[in-house]
Image (cartoon, helix red, strand yellow):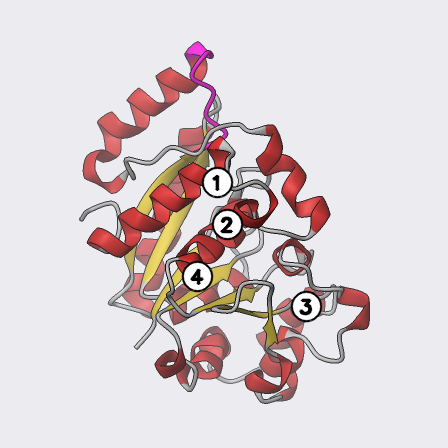
């Protein structure tokens, strides 16, 4: 039975999609069957694993809104154990269309229910907002993984997403837990990166993953080639970091061990 992890942060540019794609690929490289669910209308996770969005005949929008069988829109990737439910810009309209649907917050949960037995992990890449698409992801998930950029305003956004998780726990998904906070775009030569790490670890302790994702040129280049970092440059620091993060998740079920 798959563990469902949604990767969420309402702030853009924090390495959320990079983490979704590369963690999914790293888990698949460890011979785990992984489904990546692209819930961001920008569809960057889809293009990040080599999906040509213009050639798609169906997307997660069709499954969520039109009741399409998710297996009919699922795509294989270059990694044999990694599959994706892709997104296109159509998904932007789903936020409005979901408003009038019964059990609007639980549509993704229903959609994924029949797929859980086929995978070890289901990773959901959320949009950079706390709207209905992200709420659907949190309602469907067992855990939330929060990427946090090592920058000055990092802690401000973190408190907001923690409050949202608590609201989802109360009203929609009592079993939801924070899998952990992963520090991204870390530059060890930069005092600010080190200060942010110290502050986040002081506040959140065991909820912060040991693995830190470095600022890495090869990691930035990989999406333009439609390949996860472990296929684009396995020798890079970015690849090593995501393999370490996957090992943490497989070894202890999250930052809390």
Real-space Cα separation, disc 3 to disc 2, in angstroms: 22 Å
Can residue 233 be seen in this snapshot? yes
Depth check, front residue: 103 or 71: 71
The dominant secondary structure in magenta is loop
Real-space Cα separation, disc 1 to disc 3, in angstroms: 30 Å
Residue positioned 76% across, 80% down in the render: 57
Q: How many marks?
A: 4
Q: Position of residue 101 (x, y in %)?
A: 56, 82
Looking at the picture, does residue 84 appear above or below residue 205?
below
Q: Are marks 1 and 2 in contact (CB under 8 Å)?
A: yes
Real-space Cα separation, disc 4 to disc 2, in angstroms: 10 Å
Region of the chain picked out in magenta, as a range:
184-191
Estimate how packed mark 1 is, as few (under 14), some (14 to 19) or many (20 or more) residues with alpha carbons within 10 Å. Answer: many
Q: Are marks 4 and 3 in contact (CB under 8 Å)?
A: no
Q: Position of residue 166 (x, y in %)?
A: 31, 55
Q: Position of residue 16 (x, y in %)?
A: 52, 46
Query: In the picture, residue 4 is in which quadrant?
Result: bottom left
Real-space Cα separation, disc 4 to disc 3, in angstroms: 26 Å
Looking at the picture, does residue 178 appear above or below residue 92?
above
Looking at the picture, does residue 13 appear above or below residue 35?
above
Which residue in the protein does label 3 denote?
91
Question: Which dot, 1 or 2, sits closer to the camera?
Answer: 1
Which residue in the protein does label 4 denote?
28
What element does badge 2 sit on? helix
Q: Earlier in the sequence, mark 4 or mark 2?
A: 2
Quarter that holds the N terminus: bottom left
Which residue in the protein does label 1 denote?
239
Q: Give the residue at the far front of this rendering.
A: 235
Q: Earlier in the sequence, mark 4 or mark 3?
A: 4
Which residue in the protein does label 2 denote?
22
Estimate how packed mark 2 is, as few (under 14), some (14 to 19) or many (20 or more) residues with alpha carbons within 10 Å. Answer: many
Real-space Cα separation, disc 1 to disc 2, in angstroms: 8 Å
């Amino acid at each position: 039975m798959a563990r469902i992890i949604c990767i969420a942060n309402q702030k853009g540019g924090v390495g959320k999609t990079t983490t979704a794609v590369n963690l999914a690929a790293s888990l698949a490289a460890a011979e785990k069957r992984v489904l990546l669910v692209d819930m961001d209308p920008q569809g960057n996770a889809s293009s990040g694993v080599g999906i040509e969005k213009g050639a798609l005949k169906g997307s997660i929008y069709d499954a969520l809104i039109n009741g399409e069988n998710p297996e009919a829109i699922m795509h294989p990737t270059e990694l044999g154990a990694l599959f994706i439910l892709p997104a296109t810009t159509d998904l932007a309209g789903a936020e409005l269309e979901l408003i009038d649907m019964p059990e609007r917050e639980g549509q993704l949960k229903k959609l994924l229910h029949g797929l859980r037995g086929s995978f070890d992990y289901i990773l959901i890449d959320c949009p950079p907002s706390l709207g209905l698409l992200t709420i659907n992801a949190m309602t469907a998930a067992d855990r939330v993984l929060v990427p946090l950029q090592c920058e000055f305003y990092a802690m401000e956004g973190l408190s907001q997403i923690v409050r949202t998780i608590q609201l989802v726990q109360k009203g929609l998904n009592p079993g939801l837990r924070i899998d952990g906070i992963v520090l991204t775009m870390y530059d060890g030569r930069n005092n600010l990166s080190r200060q942010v790490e110290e502050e986040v670890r002081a506040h959140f302790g065991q909820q912060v993953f040991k693995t830190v994702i470095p600022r890495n040129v090869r990691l930035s280049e990989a999406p333009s080639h439609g390949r996860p970092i472990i296929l684009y440059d396995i020798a890079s620091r970015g690849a090593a970091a995501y393999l370490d993060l996957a090992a943490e998740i497989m070894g202890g079920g999250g930052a809390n061990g």
